[in-house]
Image (spheres, coloured by chain):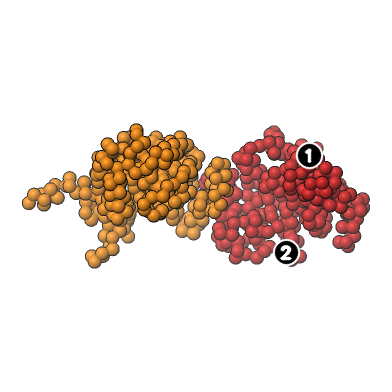
Chain colours: A red, B orange
Amino acid sequence: MDEPVLVADGLTRIHGVGCDRCLETTGPLSDTNRCSACGAVVAMADVSFALHPGEILGVMGESGSGKSTLVKVLHGDLAPSAGSAWFTQGDTRHELFALNAAERRSLRDRAMGMVHQNPHLGLNFQVSCGGNVAERLLMAGERRFATIRQRAERLLARMQVPIERMDERPGAFSGGMQQRVQIAKALATDPPLLFLDEVTTGLDVSVQARILDLILELQRETGTAMIVVTHDLGVIRLLAGRTLVMRLGRVVESGLTDQILEDPAHPYTQQLVSAAL
Amino acid sequence: MSVDFGYLDRAAKKEIRRCALKALAIPGHQVPYASREMPIGRGFGTGGLQVTLALIGPSDVLKVIDQGSDDSVNAVNLRDFITTTCPGVTTTVRTQDASMVQTRHRIPERPLTAEQILVLQVPYPDSLVVVESSEARRRVMHGEQDYARLLVKLYEDLVRFREITISHRYPTRINGHYVIDPSPIPRWDVPKLNMSETMFIFGAGREKKIYAVPPHTRAEPLAFDDVPFRTEDFRDGNGKRRQCVHCGADDTFLDEIHGDGGVTHQCSDTDWCDQRRAAQPRHAEARHG
């Protein structure tokens, strides 16, 4: 098997000062993520996994389970309290949290993409859709106007955004279309790793289906590895080969998606699956 | 050079000189300083005035211009104030005779020399302020050379107007790192910053920042590889380069004047225009005849 694109080891994020007892007093067994000794909130603790090229990993859990924290830490929006992550690109292996801010940003601009639940976080509504895609290309160092223009056209066409509307601002578009523009922007630099944070939440079912189809097609074409965060079992079933189930900051169950959905082992997963049916 | 001279007290003078030195050592970096209260309102050139007062000595010859003119209100008042408070300082309108030039919105047409210092009055020192409102985040962006959003502005201009429409305050990269706001000088003057003989010191009084472009330093306006930067061309509807109505110059930055006789154009740098006219034989005859 290929070397993993991303390896996470013991990722932990504690909000607050923290103490020695934070980890033992929180988690699913204690039924809280607030440390009874010092009051710090353990948003995520001891999360480890490996993601292989072209793989889609699902992260499932209810609100407050730490799934968005995981993505934010890996994308560099939030610093971890403990743990490490290695990102492999070609022959180079980067220890994500050992890089300085400028290196981290440059790696993220070139090799990672992020699609947020809310298009307002991922898109700049003051500039056109083409300009949004251009921003990613400019961040990655492209300085030829004609090349930027062509590439933005191709990407938006690929995401089924009408080209004749590419110079309009995202505010003029429907929610589903804004989300497709956001995906085009995230994919502008052909990143080997893409984070999708609740991308279809809040969209109607037919629009959801179209976006999920596009994501699957893209994944087959480009072999981009993805981490898909969602609380929607349908999305997990459709996209993810493997899944982590999180609760109160801990991974309570992980394995092949089919297995988890057909035969959930952890009581919490059982509850989730039966609730969806 | 003595610190006991002129309007500013010792501490202010030392601090502003230190900041100016730091600014010269890190070309394009905005150095924060404790901007003093001045007897003119903030926004009327207090930044440039403080830099001038911190650097000037009794043997200096000073020229002050506003939009290229020595006679406009801002220039006249600043010149009067400096000569009143700094005994020994003389003033001139002739660019080549000045040892220091304080300016608002223009760089003189005549190339400056290594013996001269140009001080610019700056209203908005940060080039990133148009895309990011938080100063804390702007500082990180400068540190990481994160200027993609400024280039997105240029992209949007090209898409909408097929032309970059920034007329003044054109974002310019200094020494391959920091992108500065070169104060509201027109595009015409931006190339003069590049590999210049003289040093440019920018003072922003209200925003409390000093920055500099030292001599022999690269100053590159932001642009795309296939859409290069260009200056104003001053062509009329027929594609002909407009000329100054007074001196006939067709290679200077022109002001558009709306008067009784319609629209005319004249040199924005009045000293350059006057010196050209004085050297023209027709003008000399008229004076003697």
> Residue at 14% of width from left, 50% of height from top?
B283
Residue B219 rendering spot, x and y as whole percentages: 43, 41
Residue A223 visible here:
no
Q: Residues within 10 Å of mark 1 (few under 14, many from 20)?
A: some
Q: Nearer the viewer, residue B288 or B206?
A: B206
Answer with the quarter of the image where residue A125 lies.
Answer: bottom right
Let me know if residue B91 appears in the view. yes
What residue sits 25% from the left and 42% below the top? B90
Circles 1 and 2: CB atoms closer than 8 Å: no
- Label 1 resides on the chain identified as A
Which residue does the numbered mark 1 point to in the structure image?
A: A9
Q: Quadrant of the N terminus of chain A?
A: top right
> Of the residues shown, which amino acid type is indicated by label 2?
Leu
Tag 1 secondary structure: strand
Q: Residue at x 30, y 52 (%)?
A: B77
Which residue is identified by label 2?
Answer: A203
Q: How would you rate the neighbour count of disc 2 (Cα within 10 Å): few for under 14, some for 14-19, many for 20 or more?
A: some
Q: Quadrant of residue B114?
A: top left
Amino acid type for the residue under numbered disc 1: Asp
Q: Earlier in the sequence, mark 1 or mark 2?
A: 1
